[in-house]
Amino acid sequence: MPRDENKKNTSDTNRPSLRGDAARNIRRILDAGRVVFRENPQATAEDVARAAGLGVATLYRRFPTRDNLLRGVVMDIFEADLAPAMARAEREPDPREGFLIAFEAGLSSASHSGVSFPAGITLEILQSTFLDPVSRMICRAQKQGLMRADLDPEKDTFRILCMLLAVVPTFRQDSDGWRRYLALVLESLTMTPTEPLPPAEAVIDPFRRGK
């Protein structure tokens, strides 16, 4: 009995440190993944493990496939860089201010990372984390008469994001020069139109082209 008790105590003592080690390894993998996939979107899981200073077996225990790893990195970027701002944007009483906060967060993240979209992004992820919340803000603004009624939130939000992200590479990294163009776009969305917009077409998923 004493021997069994000792064995149990030793196991209980070690368990928290193992959980801590696992959490630290995941953090190292995700941090390395951000850097490696930004520099080379075609990088392998082995490249990430090497950059993290870990064995590839350790990486695969946490992320069984490269797709799992890519998704983990993308979601980590969202949770760290965008989620707090998106939550604040949705709480804004004025949906125009919410729209501004959301796009500022997205463009700031792109400027800081030096890429418009992180490797591994999918339209589904972008839809749930950014496009759907912003579309709801546009709908609220339209109901309040604060944005032009001929906007199509479902089809226009992604293209507005793509338009704004297109200017980011024209500035030095971490520049906030994109704010000028965000202000211009927001003004065009809130102005009283003299002519209706041409019809909005369905969005073609650009992340699946060529696959």
Image (cartoon, rainbow, N blue to C red):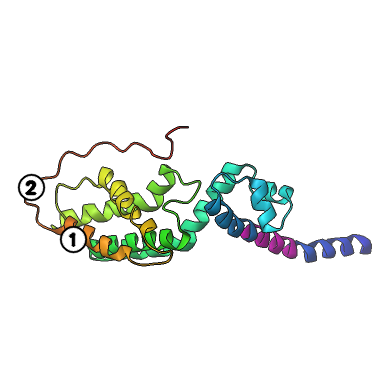
Residue displayed at 15% across by 40% down: 198
- Left or right: where does residue 171 sit relative to residue 29? left
The three-letter code of the residue at mark 2 reads: Glu
Disc number at residue 187?
Answer: 1
For the residues labelled 1 and 2, the Cα–Cα distance comes to: 16 Å
- Establish if 124 lies above or below 30: above
- Left or right: where does residue 156 sit relative to residue 58? left
Horizontal and vertical percent for residue 64?
Answer: 65, 43
Binning the other alpha carbons within 10 Å of mark 2 as few (below 14), some (14 to 19) or many (20 upward) gives few
Viewer-proximal residue, 7 or 31?
31
The quadrant in which residue 18 appears is bottom right
Residue displayed at 43% across by 51% down: 117
The quadrant in which residue 110 appears is bottom left
Is any part of residue 186 visible from this angle?
A: yes
Horizontal and vertical percent for residue 11?
Answer: 81, 61
The three-letter code of the residue at mark 1 reads: Glu
Disc number at residue 195?
Answer: 2
Horizontal and vertical percent for residue 133?
Answer: 33, 53
- Left or right: where does residue 171 sit relative to residue 155? right
The quadrant in which residue 182 appears is bottom left
Work out whether mark 1 precedes mark 2 in sequence or the reverse, and give the earlier one: 1
Residue displayed at 33% across by 56% down: 167
Q: Which residues are magenta?
A: 16-27
